[in-house]
């Protein structure tokens, strides 16, 4: 026996109950329960579903779609009529404002839009409730909407997707980079507010940075503008990560959360590769600059090699010594700090911080722990001659006594450490520890800690 289901719903949006009636029951029944009006809506029979009136000219039915109160399939405009809703009245409501789509739902609700919003999709069932104003028409169902399309409306094509501006004035896009947040060091330190705009664009941010004397500009989080003279911390990210449309111009992309779209002024004078960098990351007297150390072949660059601090065999009662070596990464810390000209490994197993000793020509860079030596303080960061992103973007290179170009990787040939590859300052042909002709010239790149 074909017995339709009935749904009980109050106008105050109380919970729905379901029960069955014979076919002969009225299609809607009003009952008064306290102050709440209760409507009993019975699923329409297949014959009723087929009886739809003629649609206004230009309108066609697209069928039944899913819908939900949390995410409406049509949502730009709407109204509810508990007594007189029909397909025609809903279409008449949507037509004057030029909407392409009209939809009826739950017997009494009408919605308009120019797009069918996600996650709405075609439904094979559920559009089975008669309209409150015409029992011969179907007006959707519970979480189901009958959608109609106005074929006479020509909707303009959507705007092209937002893109990353490749140039802005004299600034050129250099790439998308990870940025430090929640206390981590920032890539660029100077945040600029552009007056008169809600957010920024590539043009307004680069103009503001240029006016303030900064060759680097960065867009972040759809609305932030950052500037600086040099960017030492470099973690490249794919361009697809910088995907937030600018609040001030949604046709442009302005980085994203924890992502900076970096621009460089092509007319700015590059920093002198023979001079120490002076931006605040390197000149702070309270906050050390932390980095990993990598050896990069010169000239021309090449694959970086991680450098660690290797502890040498200690003598009881004497200081402990460490030297820079590719072997050190397997046994000891390879994160370092630079502050007030002192370059040193971070603390070893809570025992303290080894201090640097002045490197001798032809010898390795040595550090001492548990000693009375004075820390050598003639280290600094310089621009990277083999960097991938240009002279204003790091990672920088480590310089000692004015030289960032005197480092080399040399293979130890002694009987004490045969085959060990050490970092040597200004290799000498007089050394008995290595064959100078086999040494590889390198720069020591101060990279983002891993």
Image (cartoon, rainbow, N blue to C red):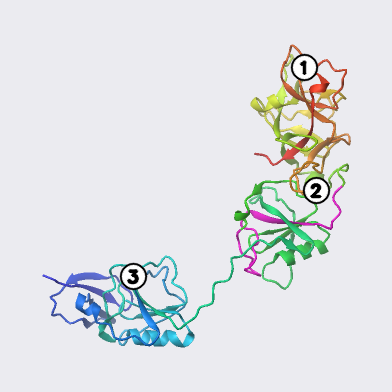
Observer able to see residue 447:
yes
Query: Residue at (41%, 86%) from the top-left corner?
Result: 93
Q: Is residue 270 magenta?
A: yes
Q: Which residue is mark 2?
A: 391
Q: Quadrant of residue 441?
A: top right
Q: Earlier in the sequence, mark 2 or mark 3?
A: 3
Pick the front one: 423 or 390: 390
Q: Is residue 203 magenta?
A: no
Q: Which residue is mark 3?
A: 143
The secondary structure that most of the magenta stretch takes on is: loop
Mark number for residue 318? 1
Report crowding for label 3: few under 14, some 14 to 19, many 20 or more residues within 10 A (C-alpha): some
Query: Residue at (86%, 53%) from the top-left corner?
Result: 269
Query: Residue at (74%, 14%) from the top-left corner?
Result: 315
Q: Residue furthest top?
A: 415
Q: Are marks 2 and 1 in contact (CB under 8 Å)?
A: no
Pick the front one: 95 or 379: 95
Report crowding for label 1: few under 14, some 14 to 19, many 20 or more residues within 10 A (C-alpha): few
Observer able to see residue 193:
no
Q: CA distance from mark 2 to mark 3?
A: 59 Å
146 sits left or right of 330 in the view: left
Report the span colored magenta.
243-271
Element under disc 1: loop
- Quick check: 93 above or below 427? below
Q: CA distance from mark 1 to mark 3?
A: 80 Å
């Amino acid at each position: 026996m074909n017995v339709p289901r009935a749904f009980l719903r109050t106008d105050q949006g109380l919970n729905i109950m379901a029960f069955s009636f014979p076919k002969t029951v009225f299609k809607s029944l009003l009952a008064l329960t306290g102050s709440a009006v209760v409507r009993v809506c019975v699923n329409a029979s297949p014959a009723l579903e087929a009886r739809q009136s003629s649609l206004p000219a230009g309108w066609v039915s697209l069928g039944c779609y899913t819908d939900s109160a949390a995410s409406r399939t049509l949502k730009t405009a709407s109204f509810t009529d508990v007594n007189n809703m029909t397909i025609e009245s809903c279409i008449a409501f949507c037509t004057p404002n030029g909407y392409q789509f009209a939809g009826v739902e739950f017997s009494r609700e009408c919605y308009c839009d120019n797009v069918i919003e996600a996650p709405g999709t075609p439904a094979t069932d559920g559009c089975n409730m008669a309209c409150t104003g015409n029992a011969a028409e179907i007006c959707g169902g519970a979480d189901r909407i009958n959608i109609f399309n106005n074929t006479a409306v020509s909707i303009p094509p959507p705007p092209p997707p937002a893109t990353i501006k490749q140039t802005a004035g004299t600034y050129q896009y250099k790439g998308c980079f990870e940025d430090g947040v929640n206390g981590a060091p920032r890539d660029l330190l100077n945040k600029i507010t552009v007056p008169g705009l809600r957010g920024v664009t590539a043009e307004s941010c680069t103009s503001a940075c240029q006016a303030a004397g900064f060759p680097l500009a960065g867009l972040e989080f759809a609305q932030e503008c950052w500037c600086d003279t040099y960017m030492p911390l470099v973690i490249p990210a794919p361009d697809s990560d910088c995907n937030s449309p600018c609040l001030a111009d949604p046709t442009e992309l302005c980085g994203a959360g924890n992502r900076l779209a970096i621009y460089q002024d092509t007319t700015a004078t590059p920093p002198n590769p023979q001079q120490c960098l002076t931006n605040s990351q390197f000149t702070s007297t309270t906050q050390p600059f932390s980095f990993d150390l990598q050896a990069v072949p010169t000239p021309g660059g090449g694959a970086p090699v991680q450098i660690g601090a290797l502890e040498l065999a200690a003598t009881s009662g004497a200081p402990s010594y460490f030297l820079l070596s590719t072997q050190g990464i397997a046994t000891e810390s390879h994160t370092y700090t630079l502050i007030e000209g002192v370059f040193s490994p971070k603390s070893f197993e809570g025992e303290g911080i080894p201090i640097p000793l002045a490197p001798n020509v032809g010898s390795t860079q040595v550090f001492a722990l548990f000693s009375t030596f004075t820390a050598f303080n003639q280290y600094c960061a310089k621009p990277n001659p083999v960097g991938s992103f240009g002279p204003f973007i790091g990672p920088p290179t480590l310089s000692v006594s004015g030289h960032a170009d005197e480092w080399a990787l040399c293979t130890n040939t002694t009987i004490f450490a045969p085959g060990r590859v050490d970092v040597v300052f200004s290799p000498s042909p007089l050394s008995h520890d290595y064959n100078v002709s086999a040494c590889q010239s390198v720069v020591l790149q101060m990279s983002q800690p891993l």
